[in-house]
Image (cartoon, rainbow, N blue to C red):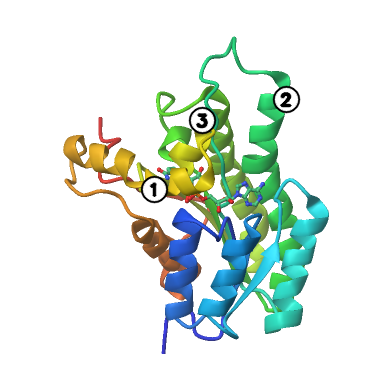
Amino acid sequence: AGRLQGKVAVITGAASGIGLGTVELFVAEGASVIAADIQDEKGAMLEKRFPGKVAYAHCDVTQEAEIEAAMKLAKSAFGGLDILFNNAGISDRMTSITEITADGWSWIFDVLVRGPALGMKHAVPLMLERGGGSIINTASIAGLQAGWGPIAYSSAKASVIHMSRAAAAQLSPQKIRVNAICPGLIATSIFGASLGLPREVADQMAARVADNAAKVQPVPKAGMPDDIAKAALYLASEDSAFVSGTHIVVDGGITVG
Ligand code: NAD
């Protein structure tokens, strides 16, 4: 049996990159998955690929009602909720403190911080019905070191790390563990998308940043979505039963200094 046999997971940002890799791994390990995203065509394809194991929820994480509906779908489709992977994300190209607008700040924080916060809010009651659960929030090495991304992005990711600790303190006594993952440079379309490229073009250039990183980071390998999915699997499964309120850096050593 798989390590997530009988478990139900909601994964946001499930249509692409790290989220997609995690859907594939969690299903292979026996989980049923609500794939939540705003890319409806890709979501429909996932349902077809994994009949009876994956249900797609159109869920913009800036919209609380859509988050709540995705959690409820976990119960109606698969009987409950055990795992939440708050992973949906964006980056932007406004790098300097003087360029970024008030709306730019709100947009990044609404997706990267308020989204996971509301995800936890609506997941917890369902997890309590099952006697506990595991929440995993995708942060970034940009939340640990300030030089990695646009200022709003790195500020938001630092928030995600701290919010995960605060939520762990509140929820762990009720057997809900909360942890963050800090990916390094992973081959996904987020880099192209942050430049405003259409999704298809962004998908095509997904490998470039990770390939370049492989030439300079201590581990000479391009970071792939599956590398992060395996960390998410550890945090989702009982293997990490004693782990809560921390973050795992999965970055090929690029932040060793
Ligand atoms: P990606 O672009 O391949 O996937 C992100 C997914 O999130 C997409 O499917 C997109 O449609 C979805 N999404 C965007 N806005 C959304 C919204 N408002 N509501 C719901 N879904 C939304 O990128 P990725 O690299 O797989 O990103 C996943 C997470 O990993 C993000 O939180 C990102 O910040 C984080 N991360 C990525 C890297 C990297 O190098 N790729 C590094 C550190 C952290």
Which residue is disc 1 drawn over?
204
Q: CA distance from mark 1 to mark 3?
A: 25 Å
Q: Nearer the viewer, residue 45 or 122?
A: 45
113 w.r.t. 61: above or below: above
Question: Disc 2 or disc 1, which is closer to the eye?
Answer: 1
Dot 3 corresponds to which residue?
A: 154
Q: SS class of the residue under badge 2?
A: helix
Residue neighbourhood size for the residue with mark 1, other residues' Cα within 10 Å, grouped as few (<14), some (14–19), many (≥20):
few
Q: Residue at x 57, y 13 (%)?
A: 97
Eyeballing the image, is 232 above or below 157? below
Q: Quadrant of the N terminus?
A: bottom left
Report, in whole angstroms, how far the alpha carbon at label 3 lies from the one at label 2.
16 Å
| Residue position for label 2 | 103
Q: Which of 217 and 95 lies nearest the eye of the viewer?
A: 95
Mark 3, Cα crowd under 10 Å, few <14 / some 14-19 / many 20+, is many
Say if disc 1 is inside 8 Å of ligand 1.
no
Q: Label 1 is placed on what type of residue?
A: Gln
Sequence-wise, the earlier of marks 2 and 1 is 2
Where 113 falls versus 122 (above or below)? above
Image quadrant where residue 15 sits: bottom right
The reply to whether dot 2 and dot 1 touch (C-beta < 8 Å) is no
